Image (cartoon, coloured by chain):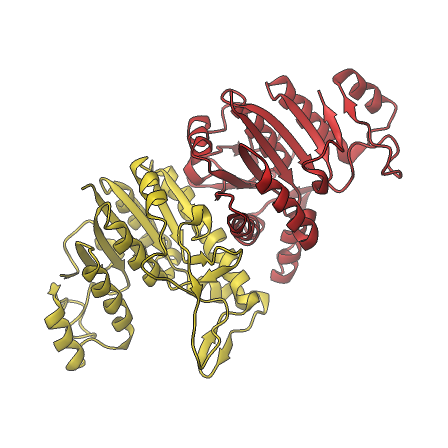
Chain colours: A red, B yellow
């Protein structure tokens, strides 16, 4: 099987021009098939502020109303996605910006919750990804660049968590590719001591993860990323990496197995 | 050769929900290959107002500065494009939203003008369109949905006129397809009397066009559209139609030959 890299970056990387430049250079230099998934919540928040779109809350949880969804579409699929695509094309990488609606790439369903109506938030499942369609693009040496928008197949766009989207792409495409899933974030990896950037734990398996979770080493912000990672591994992804975007091509970071 | 329809709609159609619904139903029902090109200047102006982005002028001409370009990327490639794609997917049309940067579909160069710096405005030429790449997508029964953004191949996005973009797509793809180019707009066609919607001129050739231009029947707003149309015909497009979006599947409208 061909190898495939699915790499997720957050909005902080997108907003950091020198770091983004370095990252895009490295991304373009990856041999073989690759998919970029980007967030951008921080940039969307700035645009929301400027537009006077308020963050709606329901029982302490953030809700995506129509206005917030519009801001997400503008920021993620428009401003961020097209600039990333143009920059990758300039580096000889045949990038194609996608939302889940394009080519019916990722279908989602409205989040069901007995307590809270989250609005236009889409959840995905094992059947969400259009594996034949995306596999065909990848075999044409096209590099999809995904923003974290999905659709319901009936004309409605949804906001979907970018980590979750990267994970579902990675495990779904494991049917046709040997997939490495990389979460890039602001730390050097999973840290034994969150205050010490040199305390990267180089490798974590499920057993160690449970230990680290129980003794409180891995704390709140990291937990959903780790859960997504182990779910992806269980579903056929070969390897998951958690690292700083500047280290994309090096071994520095945490490998989950 | 396979037939291909390249159809352009303006922002007024996009903003008119019942008309858009009717148009998208008809577009989805077109047999064979098709490309949608959309504008959205009126919607971008609203977003600019809300964001406090002022329209910059230079010697009476509109200039696209960085902020205006960002609004264009947000509005055209994000908000409008992704909602159109989701709505077409709901109708069983395998839509793929594209800017000129995606797949290097349409390369442009910064507008050169001795008098005025237009900012991030991109002009296109006969070599702008990635004909092999787009032909491959069309043969896969994918329907590209273009917003009017292009790129320079060096990482810079540009704002490009949507009529021009539709025309360059149409004539470039005439190498591989028998292309009909349709400009949809708010009138029923080219009118002999602009006050009378029933005065549609059913067919106009170059000779008649020159006459109508000289006697003032065709006035300012229509001239660039007509120039684009005849240029496209000269460069191999089989037929150009100018009609109301509600008449997409009927013969009502003006045919240019």
Quadrant of the snapshot with the C terminus of chain A: top right
Q: Can you give x and y, in whole percent of width and height, for residue A63 in the image?
A: 63, 43
In the image, residue B85 above or below residue A111: below
Which sits in the foreground, B197 or B107?
B107
Residue A188 lies in what quarter of the image?
Answer: top right
Residue A236 lies in what quarter of the image?
Answer: top right
Task: Give the left or right position of residue A75, taking residue B151 as reference.
Answer: right
Which residue is at a point 22% across and 40% down the rendered structure image? B31
Residue A215 lies in what quarter of the image?
Answer: top right
Task: Give the left or right position of residue B92, taking residue B31 as reference.
Answer: right
Which sits in the foreground, B249 or B224?
B224
Q: Can you give x and y, in whole percent of width and height, for residue A53 in the image?
A: 62, 56
| Identity of the residue furthest to the top in this view | A207
Which sits in the foreground, B165 or B54?
B165
Q: Can you give x and y, in whole percent of width and height, for residue B189 in the image?
A: 20, 64
In the image, residue B93 above or below residue B37: above
Which residue is at a point 73% across and 31% down the rendered structure image? A251
Q: Can you give x and y, in whole percent of width and height, for residue B148 in the image?
A: 41, 58
In the image, residue B152 above or below residue A182: below
Q: How many marks?
A: 0
Which residue is at a point 69% across and 29% down the rendered structure image? A241
In the rendered image, is residue B92 in sight? Answer: yes
In the rendered image, is residue A60 in sight? Answer: no
């Amino acid at each position: 099987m061909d190898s495939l890299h699915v790499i997720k970056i957050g909005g902080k990387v997108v907003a950091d021009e020198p770091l983004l430049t370095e990252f895009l250079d490295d991304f373009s230099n990856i041999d073989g098939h690759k998919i970029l998934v980007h967030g951008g919540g921080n940039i969307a928040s700035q645009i929301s502020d400027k537009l006077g779109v308020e963050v709606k809350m329901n029982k302490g949880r953030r809700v995506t109303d129509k206005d917030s969804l519009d801001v997400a579409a503008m920021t993620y699929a428009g401003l961020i996605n097209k600039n990333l695509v143009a920059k990758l094309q300039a580096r000889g990488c045949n990038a194609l910006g996608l939302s889940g609606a394009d080519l019916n790439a990722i279908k989602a369903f409205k989040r069901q919750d007995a307590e809270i109506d989250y609005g236009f938030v889409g959840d995905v499942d094992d059947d969400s990804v259009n594996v034949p369609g995306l596999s065909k693009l990848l075999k044409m040496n096209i590099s999809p660049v995904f923003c974290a928008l999905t659709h319901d197949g009936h004309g409605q766009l949804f906001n979907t968590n970018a980590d979750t989207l990267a994970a579902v792409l990675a495990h779904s495409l494991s049917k046709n590719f040997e997939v490495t899933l990389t979460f890039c974030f602001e730390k050097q990896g999973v840290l034994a001591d969150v205050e010490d950037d040199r305390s990267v734990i180089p490798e974590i398996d499920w057993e160690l993860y449970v230990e680290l979770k129980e003794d409180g080493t891995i704390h709140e912000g990291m937990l959903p990323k780790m859960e997504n990672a182990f779910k992806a591994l269980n579903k056929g992804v070969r390897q998951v990496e958690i690292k700083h975007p500047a280290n994309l091509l090096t071994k520095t970071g945490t490998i989950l197995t």
